[in-house]
């Protein structure tokens, strides 16, 4: 059971599966089984009471054959080496799936940021950069926000990097606030990309938006924006959940009112005229499309057999284990995989980096127009690859990505 919940083990299973379809060069296969570089650092932080606490930080630089390393930094008490390595591999695949010229990386710090004061959080963030600045930069590796990290934290990191190096480099970090050189649309880009994928999926499945029932597990940044965008597109969001539980309203939720309720109370639970449901039960609801938008490994062999959704759009990273994938495939459930469905975030991060490097600033309209084209084109590339190889969409996405990475890697051998 331990192996099933190990995200890096899961990631390598996915790589092996795709490699089998295309007879991947064994030398390339071997290279892709581990990151180019994995760094572990000890970050000393002076706490508000004057004591020093040591936090463990990581950076996994998986592969940069398509471009500079790219990937978020998460602050979470359950960050592990295998999680960071897996996420950096998935970022490599994600960038290649949507064909943007960036590689894959990921970072993390073992910490509960809710337990730190703002000053402690700033010192931790600057401390992370002090330990890793030499391997970062707009021409090397470009971090971004992730779980429990914010534009403010990215701003501190960028400032520290520029202090140390003595030069301006706005492209060293993406996901910055607009006044720091951030991109229009970045705050909701993961959900926007997922919504474009959902729309294209619905078209291919002949689903009418107004009759399409959707459940979203996770009502954080990505999940709440996904609910808003899909609702505006005419889809019926009938259930959502957050860490405190879930709610159902069969006639469709008023997402604007629900968002205000969550802001006021801290949870979606207790919203007027809804029925409460658990986070586990939301996954097995009878809906057209299920959107897991929380954390890894929530769809497992234990619950996959009970999933009734016709399709799944993975807004979270790694929400489905490989064994569960097989069960979903046997049931005929279409899964739009995370490496495609949530690639809107890294795509707009790439746009931000490009704007910073070129000294430009694009309008939100221009950003969304570029994002829509990339997401729609990528969706149909993966869909057509799925048909070509008679396989599932995840394997199809990995096939496309591995082919792209492999063709560049071969040139270095």
Image (tube, grey):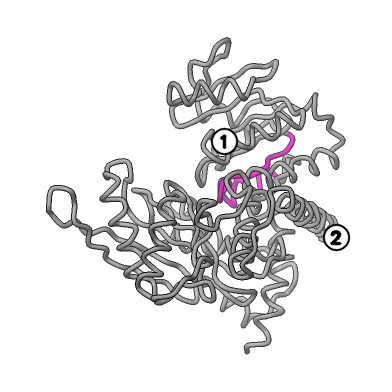
Look at the picture and state if 313 lies above or below 286. Answer: below
Q: Is residue 324 magenta?
A: yes
The tag earlier along the polypeptide, 1 or 2, is 1
How packed mark 2 is, by other alpha carbons closer than 10 Å (few <14, some 14-19, many 20 or more), is: few
Q: Which residue is drawn at 65% across and 54% down?
A: 343
Range of residues picked out in magenta: 310-328
For the point 81% across and 38% down, the residue is 202
Residue closest to the far bottom: 413
As measured in the structure, the alpha-carbon distance from the residue carrying label 1 to the one carrying label 2 is 30 Å
Q: In which quarter of the image is residue 26?
A: bottom right
In this orientation, which residue lies closer to the viewer: 186 or 148?
186
Quadrant of the rendered structure where residue 309 is?
top right
Q: In this view, does 260 lie above or below 357?
A: above
Name the secondary structure under disc 1: helix
Marks 1 and 2: which is nearer the front? 2
Q: Quadrant of the C terminus?
A: bottom right
Tell me the residue at 72%/72% (across/down). Answer: 403
Q: Which mark is residue 8?
A: none
Residue farthest along the top direction in this orientation? 273
Q: What element carries label 2?
A: helix
Q: Name the residue under label 1.
A: 303
Residue 339 coordinates in the image, percent (x, y):
64, 55
**Where is residue 83 shown, x and y percent of the image?**
45, 57
**Residue ID for mark 2:** 388
When the figure is inspected, residue 367 is found, relative to residue 41, above or below; the finding is: above
Q: Provide residue 35's location: percent of width, then percent of height.
A: 49, 72
The crowd level at tag 1 (other Cα within 10 Å; few <14, some 14-19, many 20+) is some
Q: Above or below — where is 352 with respect to 252?
A: below
Q: Does the magenta stretch include residue 218?
A: no
Q: Where is residue 102 in the image (x, y as percent from the top left)?
A: 62, 69
Q: Nearer the viewer, residue 17 or 207?
A: 207
């Amino acid at each position: 059971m331990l192996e099933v919940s190990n995200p890096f083990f899961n990631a390598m299973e996915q790589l092996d599966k795709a490699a089998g379809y295309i007879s991947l060069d064994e030398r390339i296969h071997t290279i892709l089984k581990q990151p180019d570089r994995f760094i572990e650092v000890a970050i000393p932080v002076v706490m508000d009471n004057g004591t020093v606490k040591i936090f463990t930080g990581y950076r996994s630089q998986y592969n940069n054959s398509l471009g500079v390393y790219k990937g978020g930094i998460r602050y979470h008490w359950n960050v592990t080496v295998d999680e960071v390595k897996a996420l950096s591999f998935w970022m490599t695949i994600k960038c290649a799936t949507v064909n943007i010229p960036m590689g894959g990386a990921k970072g993390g710090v073992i910490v509960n940021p809710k337990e730190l004061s703002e000053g402690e959080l700033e010192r931790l963030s600057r401390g992370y950069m002090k330990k890793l600045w030499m391997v970062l930069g707009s021409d090397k590796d470009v971090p971004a926000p992730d779980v429990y990290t914010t534009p403010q934290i990215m701003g501190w990191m960028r400032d520290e990097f520029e202090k140390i190096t003595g030069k301006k480099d706005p492209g060293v970090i993406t996901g910055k606030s607009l006044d720091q050189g951030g991109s229009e649309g970045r705050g909701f880009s993961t959900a926007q990309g997922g919504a474009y994928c959902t729309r294209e999926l619905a078209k291919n499945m002949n689903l009418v938006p107004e009759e399409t029932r959707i459940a979203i597990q996770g009502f954080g940044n990505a999940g709440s924006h996904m609910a808003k965008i899909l609702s505006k597109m005419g889809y019926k969001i009938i259930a959502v959940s957050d860490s405190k539980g879930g709610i159902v309203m069969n006639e469709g939720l008023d997402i604007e009112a629900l968002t205000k309720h969550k802001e006021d109370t801290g949870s979606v639970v207790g919203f007027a005229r809804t029925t409460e449901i658990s986070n586990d039960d939301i996954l097995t609801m009878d809906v057209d499309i299920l959107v897991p938008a929380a954390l890894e490994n929530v769809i497992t062999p234990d619950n996959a057999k009970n999933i009734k959704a016709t399709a799944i759009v993975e807004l979270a990273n790694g929400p489905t284990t490989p064994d569960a994938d097989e069960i979903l495939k046997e049931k005929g459930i279409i899964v739009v995989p995370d490496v495609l469905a949530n690639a809107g975030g890294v795509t707009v991060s790439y746009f931000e980096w490009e704007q910073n490097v070129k000294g430009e600033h694009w309008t939100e309209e221009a950003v969304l127009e570029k994002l829509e084209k990339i997401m729609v084109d990528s969706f149909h590339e993966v869909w057509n690859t799925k048909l070509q190889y008679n396989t599932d969409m995840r394997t199809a996405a990995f096939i496309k990505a591995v082919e792209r990475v492999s063709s560049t890697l071969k040139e270095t051998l």
